[in-house]
Image: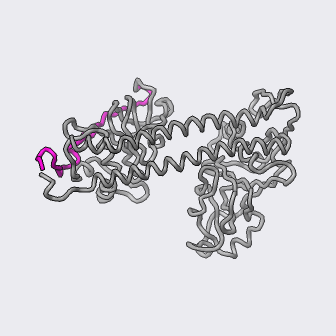
Amino acid sequence: MSKNNLCQKIKFEQICKNISVRIEDPKLADTDYYIGLEHLDPEEPKILRHGSPQDVSKTKLRFKSGHILFGKRNWYLRRLAIAERSGICSAHMLVLEPMEGKIIKEFLSLLMFSDEFYEKALMVSAGSMSPTIKWKDLAKLEFTIPSISTQETILSIINPIQESISKTQNLLQKIENYYVSKREFLLTRGIEHKKFKKVKEEYGKKTEIPESWKIQKLKDNSIIKGRIGWQGLTTKEYEKEGEFYLVTGTDFKNGRIMWETCVYVNKDRFDQDQKIQLKLNDVLITKDGTIGKIAIIDKLTLPATLNTGVFVIRPIENNYVPEFLFYVFESHHFLKFLDVLKAGSTISHLFQKDFENFSFYVPSKPEQQKIVSILSNLREQSKKLENHLLKLKMLQKSVINSMLTPLEKNNVVN
């Protein structure tokens, strides 16, 4: 084998530099592009969203196009991406510049997504609550790096998968944009109406809704319940495995409950809370912390109850379709209602007396069912694409790990 095709075992600092250009006042950074940890998705090499320097404070770091942004805080989430333009980023990131002639920037990102990188980083990370990696520790880690020509060959295999991922992401975003637009239209204009009336919303803006629609308060057509007088689990009430779920806001994902993440309560605790034992088609909403997260109970694998941070809303049977209420809680109308409640307040809490007075627009039940059917079909399309995207990413990860498996010792030079 030609020596030019052999791999080298070298330190991380020999293939990239840590760029630390500090910006003390983000608002004076002469850019409109800010990347925080919240803008990077796990194992996603592209930056799909961004923020504004005008919305942040404290010291940030400057980066340029081609730099790799690596979330050093909670690094195990594998949040890193290649910057496609210049801007500033969170100081909880490392700004890395690949060394020309040593490593291709796209290959560096593949290396950092690999299990080999994860396992070695694990040995030098510090902290238990928010594990962090320092550059000085990362710099000394050794990796087996193939030649530039071999890197190009590996990338030629990986790139088609990444292109499929990008196309799927773009299509998913288009469907999501269409879904939001369709939802807002249907919840205010309905289906095939010709006569409309003007109404005034809580925040002062006037809008038009179909003449036949009613305006109702949540308390007029729903049973709303929340836990009262209990702040958490005691040792005796908590069970690692059991027959009764305790649902919290952290178990919400994409409007559904992730039952596999729920903790358990014993039978005594479950029996004490009969009024908030969950039923099919219950709508849940978080009232503490990150308020306004929603989920609907579309299946019950075990009997379940709530913790203190969640309301259950149970539609009165003949008034409206439960899924319709779910979409109302997703709407801009409800989000603006929450904004009005939070205005001028430092407390992140949704009080029942405020929540139950939320007013929304109610079409006939048959029209609700049609609206729910249209929106549910769009959500199902998104779900199928998300599953396809997940499979592509799993394939990509498998290929990356197999390609980056260290070669035999006789293929490595020091």
* Residue 395 place in picture, x, y as percent: 41, 51
Q: Is residue 206 left or right of residue 23?
A: right
Residue 390 sits above or below residue 279 on the image: above
Residue 392 sits above or below residue 50 on the image: below
Q: Is residue 34 left or right of residue 287?
A: left
* Residue 194 place in picture, x, y as percent: 84, 27
In this rendering, does residue 348 appear at all? no
Question: Over which residues does the magenta segment extend?
Answer: 1-28
In this rendering, does residue 344 appear at all? yes
Residue 213 sits above or below residue 293 on the image: above
Q: Is residue 135 left or right of residue 173?
A: left
The residue lying furthest to the top in this view is 30
Q: How is the image coloured?
A: one colour
- Does the magenta segment cover residue 21? yes
* Residue 356 place in picture, x, y as percent: 79, 47
Who's the residue at 84% across and 49% down the image?
A: 221
Who's the residue at 35% across and 44% down the image?
A: 158
Q: Count the labels in the image.
A: 0
- Does the magenta segment cover residue 233? no
Q: Nearer the viewer, residue 297 or 139?
A: 297
